[in-house]
Amino acid sequence: MAMARFPRLLGPDDPFPPVDQALREPDGLLAIGGDLSPERLLAAYAQGIFPWYSEGQPILWWSPDPRMVFRTDGVRLSTRFRRQLRHSAWQVRADTAFDAVLAACAETPRRGHDGTWILPEMRAAYARLHRLGHAHSIEVVDAGGRLVGGLYGVAVGRMFYGESMFSACSGGSKVALAALAYRLCGWGWPLLDAQVENPHLVSLGGERWPRPRFQAELSRLTALPGMVGSWTTAFGLLPASALAG
């Protein structure tokens, strides 16, 4: 990858290039460098841009086209899985174990991938965003309070950007995603960004949106008043059985 020819962010005040300047190959690569300060990250997400890079690389910023998006009223769980949930003792909560969810997402092996993209500096950056009330975790716990699944992401206005999810028990991440969508829909947040397409997300109801459509909608949603701060009370304790439909 001949990185020298790509846009480079030289300092904390350098703006991002317009997202329509992102490369087609690799799909969505927009800029290189910069930092992971809260200000930089929030500015990125507000424009539909996210960081994603591996150890030994500079910070890489992406805006893929198409974009994987969930309508918050459109997450699909199979009939068989819903039947299982009717008898589940799992419960879902928010922002009570952010560091544990972040660590689990970083440490869970991914099929076809060695190592993790959630490097120590990334973990520190999202932990800072969490302390500032902009990054949130959704936690699925069993009857004994053990973490069995979860996800984390960033909220800007009324737009939620999912970053990563994990399962310690089968179905844990699906419950986290469905519970988040359920709550966001109830709050009047219509979209949940999932960044890049994969077959698992498509099976759960993810949609491929062209970049212009995604950008138009996020511009509207990020301008609306959101919920900065802990989501623990607002999210409440949601029984997984409530997602059975």
Image (cartoon, rainbow, N blue to C red):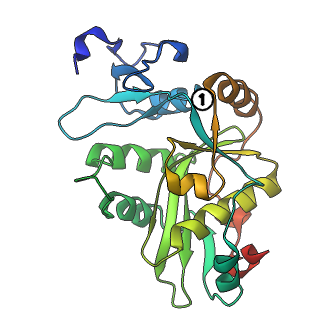
Q: Is residue 2 left or right of residue 7?
A: left
Q: Nearer the viewer, residue 152 or 208?
A: 208
Q: Which residue appears farthest toward the top when viewing the image? A: 5
Query: Which percent across, then down, holds residue 171?
Result: 53, 74
Q: Amino acid at mark 1?
A: Ala
At a point 34% along the width and 16% down the height, the residue shown is 11
Q: Is residue 239 visible?
A: no
Q: Is residue 148 visible?
A: yes
Q: Is residue 198 left or right of residue 54?
A: right
Q: Is residue 26 left or right of residue 88?
A: left
Query: Which percent across, then down, holds residue 32?
Result: 33, 21
Q: Quadrant of the N terminus?
A: top left
**What residue is pinned by disc 1?**
46
Q: Is residue 128 above or below residue 176?
A: above
Q: Nearer the viewer, residue 112 or 194?
A: 112
Q: Image quadrant of residue 169?
A: bottom left
Q: Quadrant of the C terminus?
A: bottom right
| SS at mark 1 in the image | helix
Q: How many marks?
A: 1
Query: Which percent across, then down, holds residue 33?
Result: 31, 22
At a point 49% along the width and 71% down the height, the residue shown is 149
At a point 61% along the width and 25% down the height, the residue shown is 211
